[in-house]
Amino acid sequence: MTDRILLADYIVSADEKGTIYKDCGIEITNGIITNIKKFTVDELRLFGGEVEDYSGQVIIPGFIQTHIHLCQTLFRGFADDLQLLDWLQKRIFPFENAHNRKSLRLSASLGICELLLSGTTTIMDMGTLRHQEVIFNTLIKSGIRAFAGKCMIDQNDLLPEFKSTTEKELDETYHLAEQFHNSNNGLIKYAFAPRFVLSCSEKLLKKTKEMMSLFEGSLYHTHASENKNEIEVVRHMHNKENIEYFDSIGVLDKNTVLAHCIHLNESEIDILKEKDVRVAHCPSSNLKLGSGIAPIPTYLKKGINVSIGADGAPCNNNLDMFKEMHLASLIQKPVHGPTSMDAETTFRLATIEGAKALHIDNITGSLEVGKKADLVCLNFYECDQPVYYDENNIYSLIVYSGNKNLVESVMVDGKWLVEGGFMTRGDEFEIYNDASIEYKKLLKRL
């Protein structure tokens, strides 16, 4: 691994002080940030590694998305204009049920390409019911940092053929965690992923939480309180609200990440705070499915950790963090006022707060000495309109004006995975073509 210094106009650290460095460089040794400072000409001349000049660019921490469905990327544009339970029953469950190993690999590859090319360096993926090892192997090949796990389903009234037995789900999950947790030099970790209350027996939810304790650094990742119809079914099944039910069976703690959390009462919000549960906010998905708007400013005022995820391509229909940040900020302002969800706060949800949600903020999420070199180089000359930028408007330009076209290069663990706007591992255009062919084959299997 080559030691290097990256020089840039600005370095946005996302550290606790919100430090922005001007005309400085980042020194990287063996994939670790070892210095951030203004280097002299002599220091650069005598440096034994590579000096890379990103003048005219801004370096930021890589984005961290805490709720993704890579298995669904192939279904983009084929599950529109439906509410959640119809979306699952009529489109998503049948499509996921039709996956074979090849279609799943291409769906995951397609999603990872989009994520990396738009600046995301770490994800938490929900996985799918069958062939989960394919997703893990695809993640490893890509070089991205990821938490992932087999999507666990042992009951399914929406599509009865898309489920397994409780015992088989637990057995397969254990062996996958044993094989892949902390794999690829620690880049890959296991996230236990029971789908949601409607698809999981109480035994499955509880036994999965117990199993998680065997794998230090793993997480518990599921959906909660996304849709009012979903919540009504949960009430009918358990005579409790969604979060209250989770709490009653002992699956909530600091290692639990709940996607959505839109429709919560005050008692449930207090439970999230008390148990230190993490919330993955998915604004585009919530709007497109008509599910609602999560009260994120309320959660933040309570001290609840919030991060951001794009969810899946069929309910978004992009995996671009720039779009998620833009919406995450704007949708709150009509209710909570124009000063709520300011650009810097939103940017932090997409970076360091995502790392905190995954308990990896000691190694990534911000650009600080001692942390892994997970970073993105942004070229503001690629903006739709020419802009002047400095430390006073960088957050604004990223959150309110930014898009994936800004992304010039992406580094994970000290390795360039995107350079000059192109993938360094694999040909994205070949993946696009093969995915299109495989999608047509999948349709015939439905």
Image (cartoon, rainbow, N blue to C red):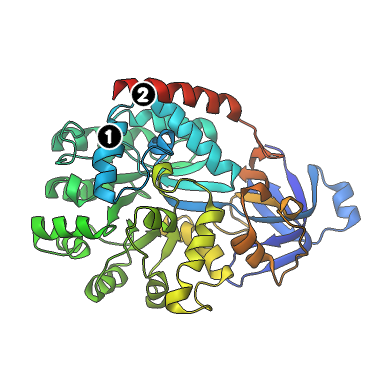
Report helix, strand or loop for mark 2.
Answer: helix
Please indicate, yes or no, whether residue 214 appears anywhere in the rendered image: no
Report helix, strand or loop for mark 1.
Answer: loop
Residue found 40% across the figure and 49% down from its top: 311
In the picture shown, does residue 105 fall above or below 58? above
Towards the viewer: 23 or 74 = 74
Occupied quadrant, residue 30? top right
Give the quarter of the figure containing the C terminus: top left
Q: Label 2 is placed on what type of residue?
A: Leu
As drawn, the label of residue 104 is none
First in sequence, mark 2 or 1: give its number.
Answer: 1
Residue found 24% across the figure and 72% down from its top: 265
The residue at which mark 1 appears reads as 129
Q: Label 1 is placed on what type of residue?
A: Leu
Alpha carbons under labels 2 and 1: distance apart: 16 Å
Residue 100 in picture, x, y percent from top left = 34, 23
Residue found 24% across the figure and 70% down from its top: 268
The residue at which mark 2 appears reads as 442
Towards the viewer: 157 or 259 = 157
Q: Residues within 10 Å of mark 1 (few under 14, many from 20)?
A: many
Residue 426 in picture, x, y percent from top left = 59, 27
* Image-based side of 404 in relation to 183, left or right: right
Q: Residues within 10 Å of mark 2 (few under 14, many from 20)?
A: many
Towards the viewer: 403 or 58 = 403
Marks 2 and 1: CB-CB under 8 Å?
no
Residue 335 in picture, x, y percent from top left = 42, 76
Please indicate, yes or no, whether residue 117 appears anywhere in the rendered image: yes
The residue most toward the front is 81
Residue 398 in picture, x, y percent from top left = 63, 60
Towards the viewer: 161 or 121 = 161
